[in-house]
Amino acid sequence: MQDRNQAHRIRKRISTALTLLALFIIMLIICVPGLWIVLNSFRPTVEIMAKPPVWTPSFTLEHYRAMFGGAGEGGVPVFAYFRNSLIISVTSTLIAILIGMAGGYTFARYRFAGKSSWFVGLMIFRAVPGVALSLPLFIVFARIGLIDTHLGLILVYVAMNVPFTIWLTDGFFRQIPKELHEAAEIDGCTRWQAFWKVEFPVARSGVASAAIFAFLTSWNEFALASQLTRSVGSKTMPVGLLDFTAEFTINWGGMCALAVLMIIPALILTFLVQKHLIAGLTFGGVKG
Amino acid sequence: MAEVSLTSVEKYYGKFKAVHGIDLQIEDGEFVVLVGPSGCGKSTTLRMIAGLENISGGEVTIGDRVVNDLPPRERNISMVFQNYALYPHMTVRENLGFSLKIANQPESAIDKAVDEAAHILGLDELMDRRPGELSGGQRQRVAMGRAIVRHPDVYLFDEPLSNLDAKLRTQMRVEIKKLHKKVGNTIIYVTHDQVEAMTLADRIVLMKDGHIIQAGTPLELFDAPVDTFVATFIGSPPMNLLNAKISGPSMVLEDGAQLPVPTDAKDLVRDGQDVVLGFRADSLSPVGHGIEETGLKAEVELDVQLTEPLGTETLLFVDFGGKEVQAKMHNPRHVAVGETLTFQLQIDKCHLFDASSGRAIRN
Ligand SMILES: Nc1ncnc2c1ncn2[C@@H]1O[C@H](COP(=O)(O)OP(=O)(O)OP(=O)(O)O)[C@@H](O)[C@H]1O
Ligand SMILES: [Mg+2]
């Protein structure tokens, strides 16, 4: 009996170790490119280009200094790009999440004609690759003067994100039993109050995750932004990366430095919101 | 506090008619239980009173107001849901105080009312927990607490005990009854459990397929069921039913046995009529092990098929009139399976129903 227990315990320990190892390898594969970018941003250009690659980290701030420096010495308008990215991503995320919540809630709670066709239609719309839309969008935007404006990109990102936010919030609201808002209504709420005081707080983690995804999509989007923006007044950070390419050369160090600046806010945001995602609400209000 | 009255209330879900013109007058302070098999429209009726389901036809009044077009919040009711529907993101205290907060009551009044309700239901220790950290019975009490912090005109309960285990259910049943004694408000209570209905109700309303079949006190339904459905639904074990044919002064059972017609029904049946004879297990007992009753009796020899000793009494399953029926033995002694005993049937305690309509044959 003792032996069996021991054998069992050892086997369990081995399988745990294997799982951890597998996870480690997968994480490594995911993280190495990011890590490489960070390392390269602090490396002198010679080392970046070296073959075979140099693995030992070295530290110089030359790329950062140059990036924030004057236009002549490899500088780029980082602050302007950052501000553009922030305005466009935050605004489009807010709008997409509001529309998504209204839509998701409607799909989850109400019955109306053609409901499933609407839903499928939205998902099909999402399936169209964004780049395929770049030419038509360019033509339309050029006609109505939205090229190279914040508003233009905001509209595009809202359209890209809404189907996704609807789909995600619909799923979360669907999980909330309808008795919750009914109880709130009996307790004296209007339908509107019942939503904001009960259903929204309960679905908060779902809304937060939808928001993160929408934000990251907008923050990282390159293909459409590179077509629809052209000046410092509206270029976003991903598009700004192109500033480091000249006709025959690419300034890898500078590119990596800007990329690091781009990753940081996304990391911070994810970190802040993940608490909501994981904390997830205990659905104890209703016997499951 | 208020009366509730339903006049020809109907409910359609699309083409499907879930409730067929219900009429019901509920008095101030009355404890009414809606009972019936699954899908008979109990919840639908309750939800129409609550305002959670719109009313397809007829009129619902609470107090002296017609509430058909009022939203739930203006009906001055509170409701306990089958799945409790506690707000998972709020503590017990916040759950209890929610309705008062919505009504913009001052903080001090809310605290006082919440503490009082919590005390009545023994929730004092749990005030800072979230619903997710409570047991089923505790959640149930919070749900009740949320209903009683306000003093609404009417309490609505939709199967509040069905998620609890048997012991807790019995305990909470007593609590609910005490609560009603204490607050004295009108209560409309839905259940499909006839024991709950019998023990709690001032008046039972028995429903089937969207119709009210019979409404009355628990004893009225038990002693004078209007048809075979009520007879088998109310009471445990259910009433025994045997097919019989009237032949002169006697009834002939399917196996040919003859019994006298109950005195009350003599003038109401005609020769050759097909009837259903109904009797409760208490009315059929081995000689010397029954309850002494006056009135007509008959003696029959029956084989015991199975016994279920319950302590103070034993249930005997016997073949009678071509069917297996249940008999009750008071002051039980050991009975072997297969033993033949002489049973006494209290004829005048029997019920007769018309075989084709199922309606009781009674004045
Ligand atoms: N939203 C709905 N749409 C269509 N039909 C419904 C809806 N809700 C209930 N029904 C139907 O109406 C009838 C009555 O339902 P109801 O929920 O009132 O039954 P109930 O008596 O409460 O049963 P239970 O004891 O199982 O809770 C059922 O046949 C049910 O299928
Ligand atoms: Mg029901």
Image (tube, coloured by chain):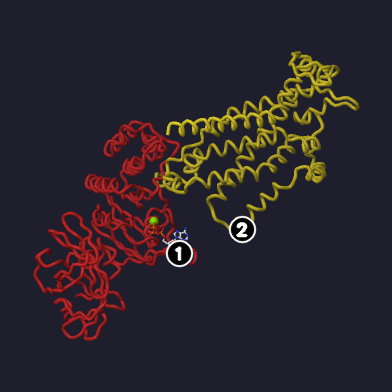
Chain colours: A yellow, B red
Q: Amino acid at mark 1?
A: Tyr
Provide the secondary structure element on which disc 2 rests. Answer: loop
Foreground of the two, A64 or A21: A21
Could you say where residue A243 lies in the image, as x and y percent from the top left? 82, 26
With respect to residue A254, does B86 lie above or below? below
Foreground of the two, A185 or A199: A199
Q: Amino acid at mark 2?
A: Gly
With respect to residue B223, does B154 lie above or below? above
The image quadrant that residue A258 belongs to is top right
Q: Which residue is mark 1?
A: B12
Could you say where residue B207 lies in the image, as x and y percent from the top left? 33, 64
Query: Subunit of mark 2?
Result: A
Circles 1 and 2, Cβ within 8 Å, touching? The answer is: no
Q: CA distance from mark 1 to mark 2?
A: 22 Å
Q: Is residue B67 visible?
A: no
Q: Which mark is residue A114?
A: 2
